Image (spheres, grey):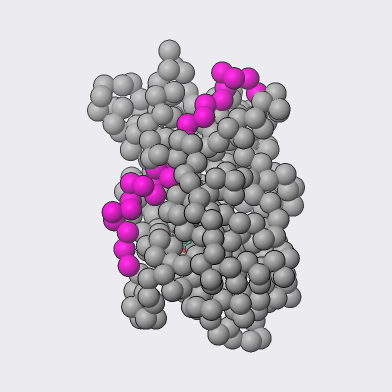
Amino acid sequence: MKVILVAGARPNFMKIAPIIRAINVAQRNGQDMEYRLVHTGQHYDDKLSKVFFEELQIPEPDINLGAGSGTQAEQTAKIMVEFERYLTSNPVDIVIVVGDVNSTMACTIVAKKLETKVAHVEGGIRSWDMSMPEEINRIATDALADYFFTTSRVANENLKKEGKSDDQIYFVGNTMIDSLLLNLTKIKKPKIFDERALTTGYYYVLTLHRPSNVDRLESFANLIGEIDSSAEAPVIFPVHPRTRKNFNLLKQAPKHIQPTDPLSYLEFIFLVKNSKGVITDSGGVQEETTVLGVPCLTLRNNTERPETVTVGTNVMIGDDMTALRNTLHKLNAGDWKKGEIPELWDGRTAERIVDVLAKLKA
Ligand code: UDP
């Protein structure tokens, strides 16, 4: 069986690395499985792409489609044009897409129009919030894909309600957590830890990149102001490129919030693991904090990852500033639920995916 794995943006790399590893094991065990890796170039900055290839030991992609930045439509269109060219001259049995970025949707549409089967890793999750570009990517991808590898039973139910049949849906767990568990012994103290005299358990980590939080300067400034005045410890803020422009435009320099460039994966996980808590709007970070047992306060009105709230350490705050202040006070006081690990988030998801792929061929 020949597959193409598609990756394009930061959160994709953690999801594909374990699948590549599992395919290599299957090959060594004599299974007939071959893959090509396509990097769409959606993220091209070294700090959002190259560093993950090095740290997660992902091989050089077979091709980089060089999509680069642009509006939603420009980026999606560029990926489609280039991927159509590539898939036409390099046909495979299945295209595997992960997550919910523009590359996920763009390559799914292209593959289906070239009559190629598509498997969606992390299929079926829904925020029910159509103002999120990611939600549109998820719905469009799942409308077309043939097979779904899911992270939760809720995702299975969502897919069934959308008309998918049992033989298309495989509840396998979470490949992002495969990467987390595999790399826990390799995490690296970032330089800023000593430079800024951080102490384990006495600082917070902040990440923000969702358009609803960062694109409007006024509401972004309010959010930063509220976190800054309620947090009673340093807040380390690796600033996503999307967020940088408005962060630089803030009129008042924050007291507690300390910006830094995006960190490498091994550095970021070190920082999260040793923190008092995380404030975020990231999808992946909600999952990672749940598995690390670190308190997570999510600045969104909804989550497509409900198990991080019902089972894990995540609390949703939405855009209510009073709730944010009160919840930060609880976090300061160490008053937080303990949380458990969601079902099948055990580090063996990629193996299960490759087992299923091998059977699909039969
Ligand atoms: N991450 C990282 N460095 C950082 C911030 C995040 O390596 O400075 C990792 C994080 O551990 C997680 C992934 O990036 O694995 C999440 O990516 P992002 O928040 O961009 O996307 P989302 O999960 O919201 O789609």
Report x, y in % for residue 8. 50, 48
300 relative position to 95: left or right: right
Residue 274 visible in the snapshot: yes
| Residue nearest the observer in this picture, 354 or 311 | 311
| Residue nearest the observer in this picture, 217 or 204 | 204
Please, which residue is most extreme toward the top here?
Answer: 362
259 relative position to 328: left or right: left
> Toward which corner of the image does residue 323 lie, by quadrant?
bottom right
Instruction: From this view, report whether residue 181 is shown above or below residue 252.
Output: above
Report x, y in % for residue 166. 59, 19
362 relative position to 76: left or right: left
Q: Which residues are magenta?
A: 164-189
**Disc count in the image?**
0
Report x, y in % for residue 74. 66, 52
Report x, y in % for residue 7. 48, 44
| Residue nearest the observer in this picture, 151 or 78 | 151
| Residue nearest the observer in this picture, 275 or 69 | 275
Instruction: From this view, report whether residue 277 is shown above or below residue 292.
Output: below
Rendered residue at 66%/69% (across/down): 326
Rendered residue at 45%/40% (across/down): 345
Q: Is residue 187 magenta?
A: yes
Residue 80 visible in the snapshot: no
Q: Quadrant of the C terminus?
A: top left
68 relative position to 22: left or right: right
Rendered residue at 50%/50% (across/down): 339
Instruction: From this view, report whether residue 292 is shown above or below residue 148.
Output: below
Q: Quadrant of the N terminus?
A: top left
Q: Is residue 137 magenta?
A: no
Rendered residue at 66%/41% (across/down): 126
